[in-house]
């Protein structure tokens, strides 16, 4: 039985990630990349869809779990009547093959243990051909091959690979899973203990660059490690989450594939990286961005694959019943074909931020930026699908228009501050026209608040970004009124919904959803900017406390059921945490 979403910890090797439950079971792993087919997919079905559990024979959830400080090395501990045992899980940095290392450590006594691995390739559908070769188990299915090596005798049982043993105090029992393409040989000897130590040293060395020392230092460091773990190292792309189809409503249809790179995440992610001393990662992310968006500005997409591929076809996996029967399970994401005008603003904002942070300019980048702006010069007047990727009718979303304004504003700043060539007079005319239209058609004077889209009475949490983006100053009465309206109409138990899908039928889907964690951090930012600092600090404290026992955040939170919802770990949530901590907490403890 799968656990709650917050019961899952993550390990990874900067190419892919595995989710491990509190019962010691790996219930999600895609090989060899984040967006590859899963070989363990129990989280979206059951054990027959693939998992690997190492736990005491008596079973049950662990009695304690933690990451080794400032690392992605997970320790899961069980205290049993026979003694205490610890399972150490990690994925060493990639070389020419994928390794997943699990080490069982005897702490006290003598604990009977059981390892059960059910490999099911192609998202839990394909049972591999398994054989015993040269002291290890080899599983092959089409292009995929996995080898499992351990000091424990392994045997086949009901289409799974099983090892049973007793671990005594002071003993270490290693298991190493290796993936390669099936036409390759393994011949790989991995020292599990050495790889655990090397991986621990890498993560501790990486996090030493973090410059944040404020009130939420531990949460910021864990969030930065999580963002790094969601990075595809060869290209610098950062996936939105490690999973697909974890539901925004238990039993509902709002289940999406987040194993891709969203352009709008760029601005927020670069803020977080640059504010904490990670220029190398910021440069890699900018490089991915420029490669991905190269070409005709009219064909700009909202998301791309981790390699920059444009085509992300969406399909359903009917053999998977979904997390807690939340169907359908979707692979790919059709929102990649939507028109979302805010993306132009996000790109130009992120390139402005990188230049402000001292990253050297790129002549090719400036040429691309001007072409993007030329296209937006006429496109901004039309409706779009909005940043929430609604699958209903296109609207004139206020947030999209504000980001169009940002696009022209940042290009004017770049030209004037850094001497870049450009038609700033024309850009200024368009910028001012967008501003005037939004303030006229996107503002409800009777309620003193901006609205979700022109003519709407509904609200949208993205309106909270207006002061942070510089569209209006924080002390403008329209900003204060909007913040207060969001608090009145979109808050549930102090947390913020993206919008009210049950009253504003813009997304074309039935049902509701949880509070969106990034939006709740945006409220904290807005409260801070309008001078309500104590409320902002209190809200960030509450949000940080929602993190799991391993410090992870999913996409949403259900304040009624008090559980995480949506894909996990969610980059947008962790980015929002870091940026709020930097804005509100500064560099010193409050």
Image: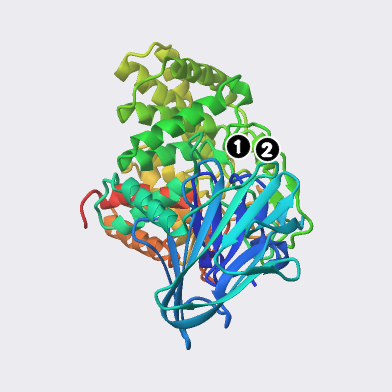
Q: Earlier in the sequence, mark 1 or mark 2?
A: 1
Is 146 situated left or right of 563 in this image? right
Is 166 situated left or right of 321 in this image? left
- Of residues 5 and 116, the one nearer the viewer is 116
- Of residues 245 and 142, the one nearer the viewer is 142
List x then y, in percent, for residue 584. 29, 51
List x then y, in percent, for residue 364. 46, 16
3D distance between C-alphas at marks 1 and 2: 7 Å
List x then y, in percent, for residue 519. 47, 52
Is 314 situated above or below 157? above
Question: What secondary structure is found at the residue carrying circle 2?
Answer: loop
- Give the colour scheme of this rendering: rainbow
Mark linked to residue 274: none
List x then y, in percent, for residue 459. 53, 50
Quarter residue 318 falls in: bottom right
The image shows a total of numbered marks equal to: 2
Figure quadrant of the C terminus? bottom left
Residue at which label 1 appears: 305
Question: What secondary structure is found at the residue carrying circle 1?
Answer: loop
Decide: few, some or many residues near mark 2? Use Cα within 10 Å; few <14, some 14-19, many ≥20.
Answer: some
Which residue is drawn at the image coordinates 34% and 60% (left, top)?
69
Decide: few, some or many residues near mark 1? Use Cα within 10 Å; few <14, some 14-19, many ≥20.
Answer: many
Mark linked to residue 312: 2
- Of residues 158 and 437, the one nearer the viewer is 158
Q: Are marks 1 and 2 in contact (CB under 8 Å)?
A: yes
Is 473 situated above or below 224? above
In the image as oriented, which residue stretches furthest toward the front?
134
In the image as oriented, which residue stretches furthest toward the bottom?
81
Residue 551 appears anywhere in the view: yes
Which residue is drawn at the image coordinates 68% and 44% (left, top)?
332
């Amino acid at each position: 039985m799968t656990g709650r979403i917050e019961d899952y910890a993550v390990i990874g090797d900067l190419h892919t990630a595995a989710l491990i439950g509190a019962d010691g079971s790996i219930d999600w792993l895609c090989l060899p990349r984040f967006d590859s087919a899963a070989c363990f997919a129990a989280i979206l079905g059951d054990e027959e869809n693939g998992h690997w559990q190492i736990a005491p024979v008596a079973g049950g959830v662990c009695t304690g779990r933690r990451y080794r400080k400032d690392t992605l090395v997970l320790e899961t501990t069980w205290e049993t009547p026979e003694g205490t045992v610890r399972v150490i899980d990690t994925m060493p940095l990639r070389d020419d093959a994928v390794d997943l290392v699990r080490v069982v450590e005897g702490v006290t006594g003598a604990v009977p243990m059981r390892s059960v691995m059910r490999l099911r390739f192609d998202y839990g559908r394909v049972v591999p051909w398994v054989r015993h070769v040269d002291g290890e188990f080899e599983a092959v299915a089409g292009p995929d091959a996995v080898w499992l090596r351990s000091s424990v005798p392994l045997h086949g049982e009901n289409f799974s690979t099983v090892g049973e043993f007793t671990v005594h105090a002071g003993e270490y029992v290693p298991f190493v899973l290796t993936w390669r393409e099936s036409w390759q040989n393994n011949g790989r000897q991995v020292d599990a203990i050495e790889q655990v130590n090397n991986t621990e040293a890498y993560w501790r060395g990486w996090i030493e660059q973090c410059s944040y020392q404020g009130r939420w230092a531990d949460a910021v460091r864990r969030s930065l490690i999580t963002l790094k773990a969601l990075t595809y190292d060869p290209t610098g792309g950062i996936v939105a989450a490690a999973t697909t189809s974890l539901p925004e409503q238990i039993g509902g249809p709002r289940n999406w594939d987040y194993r891709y790179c969203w352009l709008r995440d760029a601005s927020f992610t670069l803020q977080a990286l640059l504010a904490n001393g990670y220029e190398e990662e910021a440069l890699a992310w900018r490089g991915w961005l420029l490669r991905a968006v190269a070409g005709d500005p009219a064909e700009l997409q909202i998301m791309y694959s981790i390699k920059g591929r444009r085509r992300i076809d969406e399909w359903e996996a009917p053999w998977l019943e979904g997390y807690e029967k939340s169907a359908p399970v979707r692979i790919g994401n059709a929102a990649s074909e939507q028109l979302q005008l805010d993306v132009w603003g996000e790109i130009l904002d992120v390139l402005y931020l990188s230049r402000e942070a001292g990253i050297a300019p790129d002549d090719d980048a400036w040429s691309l930026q001007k072409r993007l702006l030329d296209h937006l010069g006429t496109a901004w007047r039309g409706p779009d699908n909005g940043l929430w990727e609604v699958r209903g009718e296109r609207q004139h979303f206020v947030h999209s228009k504000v980001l169009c304004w940002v696009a022209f504003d940042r290009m004017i700043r770049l030209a004037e501050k850094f001497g870049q060539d450009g038609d700033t007079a024309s850009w200024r005319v368009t910028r001012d026209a967008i501003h005037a239209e939004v303030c006229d058609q996107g503002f409800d004077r009777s309620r003193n608040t901006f609205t979700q889209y022109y003519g709407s009475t509904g609200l949208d949490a993205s309106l909270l970004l207006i002061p942070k983006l510089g569209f209006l100053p924080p002390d403008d009465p329209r900003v204060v009124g909007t913040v207060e309206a969001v608090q009145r109409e979109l808050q549930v138990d102090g947390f913020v919904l993206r919008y009210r899908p049950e009253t504003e039928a813009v997304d074309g889907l039935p049902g509701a959803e949880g509070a969106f964690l990034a939006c709740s951090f945006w409220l904290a930012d807005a409260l801070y900017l309008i001078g309500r600092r104590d409320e902002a600090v209190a809200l960030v404290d509450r949000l940080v406390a929602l993190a799991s026992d391993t410090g992870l955040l999913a996409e949403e939170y259900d304040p009624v059921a008090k559980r995480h919802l949506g894909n996990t770990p969610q980059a947008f949530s962790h980015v929002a945490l870091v940026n709020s901590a930097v804005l509100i907490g500064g560099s010193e403890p409050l």
